Amino acid sequence: MNNMLTNPSGCLPYIWGVKFSLEITDKNSSARAGSITTDHGVIQTPIFMPVGTAATVKGIHQQDLAHDVNADIILANTYHLYLRPSTPILEQAGGIHSFMHWDRPMLTDSGGYQVYSLADNRKINEEGVAFKSHIDGSKHFFTPESAIDIQRMIGADIIMAFDECTPYPCPYE
Amino acid sequence: MHLTHRWLIRCQERFAQSEPKYGYNQTLFPIVQGSVYTDLRQQSAEFIAKTDAPGNAIGGLSVGEPAEEMYAMADAVCKILPQNKPRYLMGVGTPINILENIALGIDMFDCVMPTRNARNGMLFTSEGTINIKNKKWENDFSPIDANGTSFVDGYYSKAYLRHLFSANELLGKQLATLHNLSFYLWLVREARKHILAGDFVTWKNIMVRQMDKRL
């Protein structure tokens, strides 16, 4: 694992997180084959990421996920992990890879979609989103900044921007 | 959508000013929004493309809109997002949705469908979908999926898996999950092989017809 902070190019650090190499674009469609290199390994694309919402792909253990399913990368949900086990616990564990014993790449979504689909009493303003936990009704407030801070502490290889997810149907405005 | 863009700038600033905590790098992907309105999707994709992120995502689809609208939005956005960065379509989808979106230029997918449907007894195979709880499988001792790549596919029979579901045994959900995830991973790897071999569209069209069947 190379430490981006010592990279000599002087580029903004986030450029260095993953590298995509496009191998081929199909002549008869827009399909592409490529590879994404992360510090936890290479992902050949196109790829499907099994969903491991609460740091578990429901019903199967990590050995089977790695060696039978042979998943290159899995996804976890910021909203769920922030509420339970909570970010300080993940920080004490040394990040999500270490906590769940998954040494291949991971991606976390930002929580925007789950706040919209699961949480109660959701109120959006310019600053962020206030919501109540679907687990115990406790009150929380996510902002773009806190979504980044939480995802830094969870420690996935690819993290997502905090967005406002719209329902369907959705009025134009 | 404009709020998502303003929030993106704040996310990118926070990201640039903070550091990873565990000795390996992290990357931030922005998300294109804009519901099912082509002009909004195009505006959003243009805004996102300008941020020059290492990868880009498309959100707000697979939320109940018809598949044709999803494909139209993915197509419009892929035409604008940079070629040399991976494109992630969030929350998609059925095996057919995945192949159709690969054809439009999507590189990454996630969805609860293979795991959630597995727990309800629905199996995806290269020849169509199976409801393993159906009585017709009660005495079918053929493998779960003769073409499947998972260990469980050739090791256990449909009749046994049906029994596990009938008896509400935990192992049933586990075997079905292993089967469905292995199938999804097989599907995208097979797609990759056919893209590299140059016959992706021919293969995709056959697969889409087959996978649409109910067995």
Image (cartoon, coloured by chain):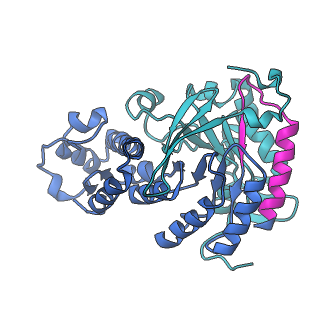
Residue A43 relative to residue A1: left or right: left
Question: Residue B66, can we see it?
Answer: no
Residue B194 lies, in percent from the top left, at 37, 45
Which chain is blue in the rendering?
B
Question: Residue A122, can we see it?
Answer: yes
Residue B13 is covered by the magenta coloring? yes
Instruction: Tell me which corner region of the image, top left, top right, bottom left or bottom right, holds residue B136.
Output: bottom left
Residue A136 lies, in percent from the top left, at 69, 51
Identify the image quadrant of the C terminus of chain B: bottom left
Residue A93 lies, in percent from the top left, at 69, 25
Residue A99 lies, in percent from the top left, at 62, 27
Tell me: residue A48, above or below residue A122: above
Residue A21 relative to residue A166: left or right: left
Along the line of sight, the residue nearer the viewer: B136 or A149: A149
Tell me: residue A15, above or below residue B123: above
Shade representing chain A: cyan
Instruction: Tell me which corner region of the image, top left, top right, bottom left or bottom right, holds residue A36.
Output: top right
> What residue do we see at 54% from left, 53% from top?
B106
Tell me: residue B211, above or below residue A33: below
Identify the image quadrant of the N terminus of chain B: bottom right
Residue A59 relative to residue B175: left or right: right
Q: Residue furthest front?
A: A27
Residue A65 is covered by the magenta coloring? no
> What residue do we see at 63% from left, 73% from top?
B38
Tell me: residue B35, above or below residue B16: below
Number of on-image labels: 0
Give the magenta range.
B3-29
Instruction: Tell me which corner region of the image, top left, top right, bottom left or bottom right, holds residue B80.
Output: bottom right
Along the line of sight, the residue nearer the viewer: A90 or B29: B29
> What residue do we see at 74% from left, 56% from top?
B48
